[in-house]
Amino acid sequence: MHEAVKILVRGRVQGVGFRPFVFRLAQETGLKGTVQNNMDGVRIVWEGSPETIRSAMKRLVSERPRLSRIDEVTYERAETAGLTDFTILESDRDGKSSLVIPVDSAVCGDCLHEMRDPGNFRYRYPFINCTQCGPRYSIIDALPYDRPYTSMKDFPMCGKCGEEYRDPHNRRHHAQPIACDACGPHVSLIEMDGTVLGQRDEAVRLAVRSLESGMIMAIKGIGGYHLACDAANRASVEKLRQRKNRPERPLAIMAASVDAAKRIAVMSDREESLLRSPEAPIVLLEKSAAYARTLPEALAPGIRTIGVMLPYTPLHHLLFDDGKFSYLVMTSANPSGLPILYEDAPARAYLDGIADRILTHNRPILHAIDDSVVRMSERAPFFLRRSRGYVPDPLPARTNVDGVVALGGQMKNTFALGRRRQIFIGPHLGDLSAVESVEHYEKTLSHLMKWMGIEVKTVAVDMHPFYSTRSVAEKMNKPVVPVQHHHAHLASCMEENKLEGPVFGVILDGTGYGEDGNIWGFEVLYGDASGYRRLAHLRYTPLPGGDRAVLEPWRNAAGMLIGLLGERGRRLAGRLFPDKESSIAVISRMVSMKLNSPLAGTCGRLFDAVSAILGICTESTYDGEAAIRLSEHLGPGNVNAPPYPFVVTEKSGLKELDFKPMIEQITDERLKGVPPEPLIRRFHETIISACCSLVESIAEENPGFGHRVVLSGGSMNNPFLSLRLSESLEARGFSVYTHHLLPSGDGGLCLGQLMIAAAKSGV
Amino acid sequence: MERKVTLACGDGGELAHKLIQQVFVSAFQNQDASRFDSAFLSLESGKIAVTTDSFVVNPLFFPGGNIGKIAVAGTVNDLSVAGSIPLYLTAGFIIEEGFPLEDLRKIVRSLAEEASAAGVRIVAGDTKVVEKGGADGLYINTTGIGVQRAEHAIRPGEMQEGDDVIISGTVGDHGIAILAARGELGLMTDLQSDCTPLNHMIDKVLESGAHVRMMRDPTRGGVATTLVEIAEDFGAAIEISETALPIRNEVMGACDILGFDPLYLANEGKVILIVARNDRQRVLDVLRAFPEGRNAAVIGHITGMGEGRLLLETPLGSRRRLRRLSGMMLPRIC
Ligand SMILES: [Fe+3]
Ligand SMILES: [Mg+2]
Ligand SMILES: [Zn+2]
Ligand SMILES: [Zn+2]
């Protein structure tokens, strides 16, 4: 008895060897039929016995190629056609739009094995790769993805490599970056003055010795240069911090192996598989009890977590293989506020005075790409930065978004490009304040648009009048749709979760420009991509000095106290920050004169203020420091803590949340010397309880609104806050949706902007 | 005579005559011009330069000057930076009823003194008194007349890559001095406004034969706004360096507290010059020989012609694009 099924596999299934895999599966099971790439994914037709088909379908998922990702498998019964063989059909798509840009991937197990085999001709060759691993996005110059259009074009294959490349049964069949020591790129170790200390394997061995002796090394990787040193060597770590002028910001480390990582961090199975994945992101892990015996506090001072990744290039593995060290600091080499360095000449110029030596190579990096940063929450992976390994994998869109380009935010910038029913999210481009960053942004944007063959129809930008993306948009000469920042956060989370129709959005964020000209960031919205209503927000308090108040949380705290409590607030601020007393006197007058004191109601600034009031962080040395270090005081476990009192008032349908009683009480307790931990827990609970009661009361007043809530905004990076808020809303009967594909913060903003612009322009 | 200005002082009658005689004429000592409804001026042949400006300052008196001094400096400097030689001024006063006569005398005297120090004659004037509340104390309008230089003219058309941007002294003194003088902020500083006419110093720079492409006085909107305007008007890419800016510690300290950028603070006695690189030292030497040019410094240069834009190199080495002063200072850090 034969039957036939039509299967559609969606996800990352193109350009990753999926069709040959299906072909092999068919050959092994004796199934007949066809496999074909099309716009939606891979289409398979199988004919055979029902049992064989069922087992083949299971193997389709369990044995899928390493670089593939299956999001969805759908199938339907079909008429049997009495097929007699299994064939790979040509893609049924045409032209540029069908091309996929593959992602960069960590070296695979097979390649590693060969690299460590003294009998193999690629023994200790630092650029070994195959169809299932190696660089892609970062080395592609033009599409289609073919060796002459990559940075491998200047390395003609030798006979041995060429044989493998042409052999359809070889695992390097059409592996474009294929190379060996005889024909491929090689590494060199250079002094800062350009003196070559060693080449090829000698360079690697010397580099290991340099690191072992405590030197700061610059290492050229997949998407840019890293600064590296022995992470266990406290003096080196401190030297690196000092030279890079980065006093507090946590540094990520690379651990030699999963075992080494487990010695210093607590790791679940899901975290382990994320670490081992081909995307090889930096995973934020809780430091273990043994951490302090192995690694210095200086790596991530005052923080319970440590960012860990595994070696992802063959060269990284070679550095660890001698066993001279188990952990390396691996921080991207970029001057403050500027993009990661990836071109050799500027890198060398900048690194002079920072690095002692450079381990470099002669395979050019064509496109910079930073390491991705992910944290595993109890429910799903949580992206803090989605870049290497994930970009430029498209997200499927439910509607046609062709030609819509969304330029993203000012900080943690990413952009999004719509092509038919696909959305391409660009790499992490960071802070766009510097002109160099904007130039890098424009270059990356136009490259990707060219690759995808995108013709811009509509440009979405943030409503903020001074974001750098504004001038980029003007140059494009197409209709511009300004999008409110938190509306974009709402639409982004909705799109990720494929939600239709209006929903609630609880958006807890840093600072975003509001439609009333004030700074928003603690919002209860209701809407979808086509529009929104603002139903509740945090009471505004002044931010004396504007951006300066963001960099100096004590100032923000003083502004908040003065704004809420007037003269008494000024006195309290003076007691909390005695060394700032004379400044606080001026600040209080600035507030009453409304001089350079924009009004803000944002969750991020609320966290900053409380962090400063509690003396945890009064001046910020890196983005988000005050809020991060505040939440770090929360130990694991759900200790029940009663919320502080808060007040909600309402004016013409807009509720205002007033935390004055809480700020007063926290200040009072702090001045009385109450230890901070219980206060911080109560502070979190107050935010959670206030959000729940706002959403609940609005839902009661508006029975038609339904019970779906999306959570978005930078404050949702706080794992405790987002988890507890989800649980509490669910306990009240709401369905809660969070981000799991893109960051909650501004790294995910572009997706929402794109959906809103598409809805508004009716593409 | 009354100790305060009354409405009747402005009605054209006896009291008005007395006010003019006792306050203005005695200060200006310019009898011949005041006998007619118009002043008759003799000018050399050539092009005439005319500029007008109204002055509204709060407070009227501040360390380093008063509204009278600014009314001269502002207009004289506007003529001078345009490459002309200032010769004559007219002055119109709008006075609020009840304004202390003694203050008016001081202001008028200071206006007269500054004019004579700058070598310009006050040739016509007007006074109006408005009802209490109709004006905030006192406003002054001055119109300046000068002649365009026949020799040593400025040549904006020759602006080119490599030219230096020079400022004649410290940035932001006036802005902070005024803010401090208001007293409302409780800023503790004895900073003086830089308010002063610059025409003699500018004359010497031009007469030195240096190739000066362009001059502007960075008043309202500050150095940044002024340079953005030059950049856009002439299609010049200008880059200045934060570390090269001469800034007084008091100004820096006040900016730290207020979250202000000194590049956007007003100056009333500074000139920005764009000069050929080869003439950099010559210009600096001339400027530094004057007390008001003592802190002159090269703050940047033109990096190319084409797209007009102003960049600031930060101490960290990155560059930030600067725009005109805007009404709002909104945080962008999310
Ligand atoms: Fe945001
Ligand atoms: Mg003027
Ligand atoms: Zn491989
Ligand atoms: Zn080879």
Image (cartoon, rainbow, N blue to C red):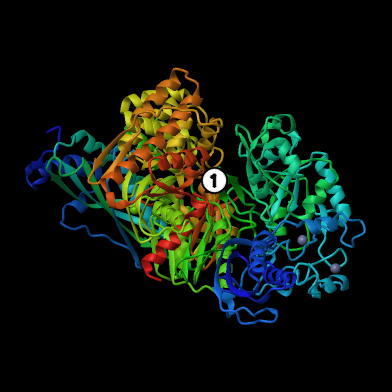
Q: Please rate how many residues cluster around mark 1, counting C-alpha atoms within 10 Å: few if below 14, some from 14 to 19, many from 20.
A: few
Q: Is residue A235 visible?
A: yes
Residue under label 1, please give it: A379
Residue at position x 92%, y 56% in the image: A118
**Residue B306 in picture, x, y percent from top left:** 51, 68
The residue sitting at 9% across, 48% down in the picture is B12
In this view, the residue in front, B266 or A330, is A330
Label 1: element kind: loop
Name the image quarter holding residue A353: top right
Q: Is residue B330 visible?
A: no
Picture coordinates of residue A374, whole percent (x, y):
60, 48
Vertically, is B240 above or below A424? above
Identify the chain of the residue marked 1, using the numbered disc in the image. Answer: A
Q: Quadrant of the C terminus of chain A?
A: bottom left
Q: Name the image quarter holding residue B24.
A: top left
Q: Residue furthest top?
A: A672
Specify the quadrant that holds the N terminus of chain A.
bottom right
